Image (spheres, grey):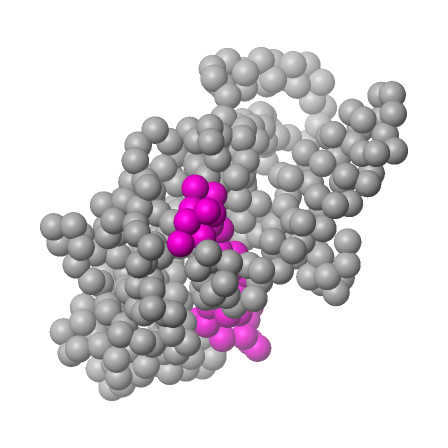
Amino acid sequence: MESIEDLINKTSDKHPIKQAYINKHRYYTDFIETMVVFQENLTKKEYENLLKKFLFDKEYDRQRYLQIVSEINVLYYVLRVHNNNFKYEPKYNNGYNPECSFEFRNKSINIEVKCPNMEKRITTEERNTLKIFLVERLIKHKAIINEISNFIGHNYVGSDYSGIEESTRMDNKLKDFLKSAQNKFPISTGLNLNILVISLETLSDMDEWYLYVFGGNGVFTEKSFVLDEYENVDAILLTTSATGHAGWYYYEDVNVWKLEETLSILLLNPDRELTETGEFYISDGIDLFGGLSKEFLCFLNKLDENNKEKWKDEAGDNWRLRYYEEKLKEMQIVSEFSNYLKNGCKL
């Protein structure tokens, strides 16, 4: 590990690992333990290439850093929990490669990891403006935003806001990730499971990206807004693994390099439900990244049952209130799930 220490001493003071090293924070020592596992499982060349991804010899770039540590979280988990015929960056489709593959229950599991760039969103949120966010994709959305802005503009005068602006959707980024994964994954068959991992920074990001998957025009719905092919993607794992790295200094009692310390939910493409892949997901695959995916499905089922009972008693105009209540809950479904877990799995 002396070589890593040399790299850290030479790198920018803005680099999180150097900051943790200087401040004797566990983020650094946990990182070293993580690298030991990689050094033991990768070839010398693979390990050296992995270290280069941390960009110790370059100016610190927050987005590129969050991308590599998101990859590390998943790879580190796989090496500790599912290290059976592990392959680092296996080559498929003319040399394109996902992050890794491994064998589990006679299936080849292939994983690609992406961390969306939230810099523009963060900059928008930091401005003292009233934000407008459209939950679903709408035709002529710019005209709709302008209309809403004009309507609100007559009513917010005298408030503390400096203006009105749109908080833009990021679903096109998911589209890019799916197209990229399509090229990297092998053809989806009953012999494999191809998983696209989306690493996010906050719980509200999880709410938003879940809607990109299963909301109106979601990519795993019959009316998907993505027209390009992505049939090689069997499942999407939404995880908050980037959270611990974005704010590592707050976590004195948590090893944020471990994926199991995050909220991770594996979502199956419904087109696979009645296939061998779907059967595998229900029997084994759903637990690949811990038990929260199964808990989430149970939570959704409980919500459905509760809603059926509530709607039975609705009459007159009250149904509208119930409808908007359920739409609001849908917009915050992962946050609702988090509260459900905190309440001892009670609705």
Q: Out of 121 and 113, give the one closest to the viewer.
A: 113
Quarter-wise, where is residue 10 in the image? bottom left
Q: Out of 95 and 72, give the one closest to the viewer.
A: 95
Q: Is residue 103 above or below residue 239?
A: below
Q: Quadrant of the C terminus?
A: bottom right
In percent of width and height, residue 329 lies at: 69, 41
Q: In percent of the image, x 27 and y 44: which residue is there?
A: 182
Q: In percent of the image, x 54 and y 53: which residue is there?
A: 202
Q: Which residues are magenta?
A: 250-278
**113 lies left or right of 342:** left
In the picture as drawn, the residue positioned furthest to the bottom comes out as 2
- Can I make out residue 315 in this image? yes
Q: Is residue 157 above or below residue 18?
A: above
Q: Is residue 173 above or below residue 240?
A: above
In the picture as drawn, the residue positioned furthest to the left comes out as 94
**244 lies left or right of 35:** right
Q: Is residue 178 on the magenta stretch?
A: no
Q: Is residue 267 on the magenta stretch?
A: yes
Q: Quadrant of the N terminus?
A: bottom left
Q: In percent of the image, x 37 and y 31: which residue is there?
A: 226
In percent of width and height, residue 181 lies at: 29, 47
- Can I make out residue 59 in this image? no
Q: In percent of the image, x 58 and y 52: which residue is there?
A: 203
Label total for image: 0
Quarter-wise, where is residue 7 in the image? bottom left
In percent of width and height, residue 307 lies at: 76, 40
In percent of width and height, residue 170 lies at: 44, 37
**54 lies left or right of 238:** left
